[in-house]
Image: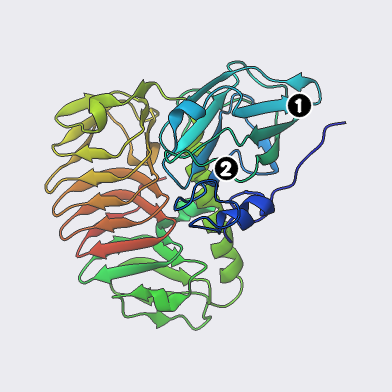
Amino acid sequence: MYLVASLGAACGDNLGVSDAQNSQNSHLDGAPGDATSGHVVPRVVSISPGTSATNVPRNAKITATFNEPMDTTTLVVGTITLGSMSGPITGSVSSTASTITFDPGSPLTANTSYQVTITTAAKSADEVALAAPVTWTFTTGTTSIPPGVPVDLGTSGAFVLLGKTGITNVPISVIRGDIGVSPITSTAITGFPLTPDASNEFSTTPQVIGRVYAADYAVPTPAKMTLAIMDMETAFNAASARAPDVTELGAGMIGTVTLVPGVYKWSTGLLIPTSVTLSGSATDVWIFQIAQGLTLSSGTQIVLAGGALPKNVFWQASGEVVVNTGAHLEGNVLTKTAATLDTGASLNGRLLAQTLVTVRASTITVPAP
């Protein structure tokens, strides 16, 4: 029989860490569950595929993200395992300072339940182990992700700006497309004079050519916003799970280069100090996986060439995304933390943030479908 260890709510945000680990992770400075006095017990804060996920692509990679910098020498084969009723699955393991990834190497069996375990062999950079093993399950579908397929944004793709803790604007910005917040309420949308619609399902404002939605508006808006946030987080994990074609390009700093379609991955932050061109056709896809933050220097331009479309460009960053004064970004931004467009910056795409979105006299346009 295939035993399944259920996963509880992680730190209140349903990221899939066991209740036992949550309890112990809350103790610091030598309290129970702290292996070394004065150091924080590491914990898993994000997983992909998600717990109990279904129809997972057969060629998906399994990834977990930690809250603490980790000792990468402990993030090896055996620290993360994958198995089914038929037995363990062999594969390769790669890691960064904050993530561990298991690559099965060959497609998993269709319509099959798998169990992932991260053992207490995983240790932080301070040599503190996980308080308890982390275990979750997922079920495969019948298909695989072919190369060059865009990340599915789900209902989050209906928004040009989406934030969990708020949207702050410094006038005057021009925003073309719908914006929304959840689970925070409309009071966290600041810098816009909001006029509620008669239905109270949305508001309007002169700086937004579209509608403004929030979790505290009338039904059916709360459910709409909850689903959009869930789809945003699912898309973030899906983008992070794609197999990279290029790793550590420019050691975390690129500029004055032309990039062909593909998946680019950095275990650090990414700084773009000078303009970068993405050259390809209207069906080509670019995915940028960034373990820390993304920064565009002032005046830097992301340029699309050869028919490339912004809807097919995805910036997946675990840290803060900052587009500095006068810079221009193309594509969809999926950030684990915050996103900021500074004065005179512009975006042809979306800002989908798991915390706060800040725009300062910026221009944002949702890309054509």
Q: What element carries label 2?
A: loop
Marks 1 and 2 sit apart, C-alpha to C-alpha, by 24 Å
Residue 81, percent across and down? Answer: 65, 27
Instruction: Please report whichever mark, 1 or 2, sits nearer to the chain's N-terminal start.
Output: 1
Q: Which of 196 and 181 is in front in this view?
A: 181
Q: Which residue sits at x=68%, y=52%?
A: 20
Where is 142 relative to 340, above or below?
A: above
Residue 356, percent across and down? Answer: 37, 62
Q: Looking at this rendering, what residue extends furthest in the right direction?
A: 1
In-image side of 119 versus 241 (left or right) = right
Where is 269 relative to 245, above or below?
A: below
Query: Which kind of residue does numbered mark 2 sit on?
Result: Leu
Q: Which residue sits at x=50%, y=42%?
A: 128
Q: Nearer the viewer, residue 335 or 132?
A: 132
The C terminus: image quadrant: top left
Packing grade of label 2 (10 A; few <14, some 14-19, many >=20) is many
Packing grade of label 1 (10 A; few <14, some 14-19, many >=20) is some
Residue 307, percent across and down? Answer: 29, 30
The N terminus: image quadrant: top right
Answer whether residue 305 is visible to the viewer in this image.
Answer: no
In-image side of 229 versus 312 (left or right) = right
Q: Name the colouring of the figure.
A: rainbow
Residue 33, percent across and down? Answer: 60, 51
Q: Mark 1 = which residue?
A: 84
Numbered mark located on residue 130 in the image: 2
